Image (cartoon, coloured by chain):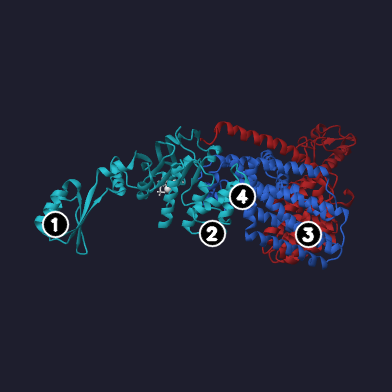
Amino acid sequence: MKPSKTGRSVWTLALVLACGWAILVPAQMALDRRLAPYRETPELLWIPSGNVLRSLSLGHNGLLADLYWTRVVQYFGARRLQRRTDFPLLAPLLDITVALDPQLLVAYKFGAIFLSAPSSYGAAEPQKAIALLRRGIQANPEEWRLWHDLGFIYYWDLKDYRAASEAYREGSRHPDAAPWMQVMAAVIEEKGGNRETSRFLWTEIHNSAEDETIRKNASMHLETLRALDDIEELERLAGRFRERAGRWPQSFQEMIAAGLLQGIPADPQKYPYQLQSDGRITLHPNSEVKLDYGPSPEAR
Amino acid sequence: MRSRQTLAIVLNTFREAVRDRVLYNLIAFALILIASALLFGQISIGIQKTILLNVGLSAISIFGLLIAIFLGIGLVYKEMDKRSLYALLSKPIRRRQFIIGKFLGLNFTLLVNTALMSVGLWAALYYLMRRFEPQDLSVWVAIYFILLELSLVTALCLFFSCFATPVLSAVFTFMAYVIGNFAADIRAFGELTENNLLKGLTTVLYYLLPNFSDFNVSAWVSHGKPVAAEVVLLNTLYALCYDAILVAAAVWIFSRKDLK
Amino acid sequence: MAAIEISGLSKDYSLGFWRKRPFRALDRLSLKVERGEVFGFLGPNGAGKTTTLKLLTGLIFPTEGTATILGHPVGEPETFLRVGYLPENPYFYDYLTPQELLDYFAQFFPLSAEERQRRRDAVLDQVGLAEFRHRPLRKFSKGMLQRVGIAQAILHEPEIVLLDEPMSGLDPVGRHEVRELILQLKAAGKTVFFSTHILSDAEALCDRVAILNRGKLVGVGQLSESLQRQAACEAVLECASPEALSRLQPLAAKPPLVSGGQCRIEIPEKNIPQFLALCQSDGLRLISLNPVRLSLEDYFVEVLRGSDSERPASPSP
Ligand SMILES: Nc1ncnc2c1ncn2[C@@H]1O[C@H](COP(=O)(O)OP(=O)(O)OP(=O)(O)O)[C@@H](O)[C@H]1O
Ligand SMILES: [Mg+2]
């Protein structure tokens, strides 16, 4: 008469659910392991042409582009997380994304960064990044910042200073372009790669990026640049000490006593620099500041 | 006696579906789509078979999904709403027999439909290749997975149909289907974030939601690759277990429901 | 063992979308129906008749109280082997024909195939649908559906038949047939429990009735006693002068009705001699004088008036 013995049947249901998931979870885990190769087959590229997809999207191409852009980010993030160094689907996915929505600026800007960044940071395919950006410039002629993104890849990744200066000059002709675009064009043309320019560009990227990873990446580069400057300066001071004392300083203390330093110098991550017996300056072993790559070709 | 009664409900559910004109329209549509894949394949070179299998399997899956949702959402609700249940439940049967019978009946309907559409696909395949190859067998596995997937959709529909209106049930089921397809992405997203709470939440969600992407091997088999036997077994286990949970929950809800 | 035994049965429905408040549709009903009885369940619209029948069939669950049928708590599937139920305004799978529907329902009973077929044909005949057995139920009229409902209720020859407004939607012939059917069931020793607000049906068929109003039991008993008690006569006169009428008025139970040159007037039994004397002395032409048994309608109205006046504050349903 009553809806059966309610109390008892609640427990029965709870038991069924618990047992159910006790089977489901391990089954799913086993499936995840076994299905890995199947999932490699990129279902996304069933329709490899963005244009076909665009007409198939029945007017929802904007939404679809957003979804694809999300897939790009997920794909990139997931592969980096797995410490994979190849990103075979990155360029095709980006192509589809911008074909679906040519005005999706983030896709050009960050897509280019993902594509151009060196191996283990990105796909190390700067040429594809350039092709992507040129496509973006064509579709969005009013966006002078894309010229900056393009110039930066020439400057930083390809060390092609002539092309970089060319890109900045082209961008600076735009009526809305920031004045520094023209300055960049001139400086790069004259001096090629140098820390001053690099610092400016990375700062610009850092300040204009909305994305946390991009900003982190930029501030990492800025730290590198600062450390390189610091080390150069400290080694110069150590040289001065040697000129006066006729020997290398044994510690920063000695240099402070000689009035060359105000205190123990620290790197951007607040670790003190290390003074070697031959006057060379190195990083603290715990410091994660990277010195091993920079704008000069030999550092790559 | 009990199983004979349940069988009667199963067959009546099947009969109800068979007498619905919409069903035929959907099947016809799927068959037309498969046939058109043949034409579509002719304008490209070398991948006719792949295209045919992809389009065919997708058509079977999508139209199966439509049929499952279309028929599933009304399974219980319509009978409550139109009060045809009053006469049925005043027969010597238990309410759970009704739920189980409906579930099995719709699955049987879907089995027959899928078989019909598969015959269409195989006919098209034969027309294209003029012969069958041993690796074509894995297409059956893909079709079997579609059936498992549809049984899960049916169970979801049935579950929602016990307390929600057909439109809401359709929305819920469809959402569960879409989210279930993206389950892996949701978890990947959680792992990318540094937030432990979010990570935990997405992992729980991942195991809680029906993972429809487990059943998607169409792209794989369209290249003539075989599917491992363990995957078949695990997927079967997964689907049956999830079905059982949903049907049990549906029985639980329905058994204590006032049929006003 | 009683056929149906209801004790303290109550049902609250919740009303309102956001703030649920309970509404008592049935209030502590206690009732006993003996085997072999034809029992009428009377009450105005919204009294709780359908609610009671749905509780008896386990379609809804009681808020409190219990009910048993043939000694078994209601809602047990086994009970339905011996109970048939006709829902109010029945509706069936409209994609089936009556024959298919009955075949379907028959499979729930432990009967052989031939037996199922025999019973199906028998009930189709009984409710007069034999010639429509292959027409889809989608194309059935209300009264025809009602007949299908009756057919499925008696399909398995149940000992107890619960009928919710069996006459509703039926034409005069159909009503007569259903009356006959109920009498046949009674003759075969079955118990029939039916709800109705058509009192003449109850009057003609029931051994006992229960009257329900606003969820509460107002009275249970045999009809004939209560009706005879208050009998009166209706007199029809050729239209009289107003003075003559005013002299008649004190004798009448209600104000006279004047229409079409005739005057109808209801005279209680005890006033009849006085009335006849008056007619004679005034020279009024009496056209007819017939006894009116107090109709069940009147009884009903009277009883309900009594029960409503217990709660004068609440508005009528
Ligand atoms: N599902 C429900 N939800 C809320 N209230 C309900 C519900 N069903 C019935 N009621 C209320 O319960 C009361 C009794 O209804 P019930 O259907 O039992 O009356 P009834 O005696 O069968 O009337 P009728 O003669 O019109 O068929 C009514 O006031 C009705 O409004
Ligand atoms: Mg009613």
Some atom of ligand 1 lies within 8 Å of the CB belonging to the residue at label 1: no
> What's the distance in space between the residues labelled 2 and 4, CA to CA?
41 Å
Q: Chain of mark 4?
A: B
Which residue bears the numbered disc 3?
B121
Q: Nearer the viewer, mark 2 or mark 4?
A: 2
Viewer can see residue A184 = no
Which residue bears the numbered disc 2?
C132
Question: Do marks 3 and 2 both belong to one polypeptide chain?
Answer: no
Q: Position of residue B257 (x, y in %)?
A: 53, 42
Amino acid type indicated by mark 4 = Phe
Look at the numbered discs 4 and 3 and tell me whether their residues touch, using CB distance below 8 Å. no
Q: Closer to the N terminus: mark 4 or mark 3?
A: 3
What secondary structure is marked by label 3? Answer: helix
Which residue bears the numbered disc 4?
B172
In the image, residue B67 above or below residue A174: above
> What's the distance in space between the residues labelled 3 and 2, CA to CA?
43 Å
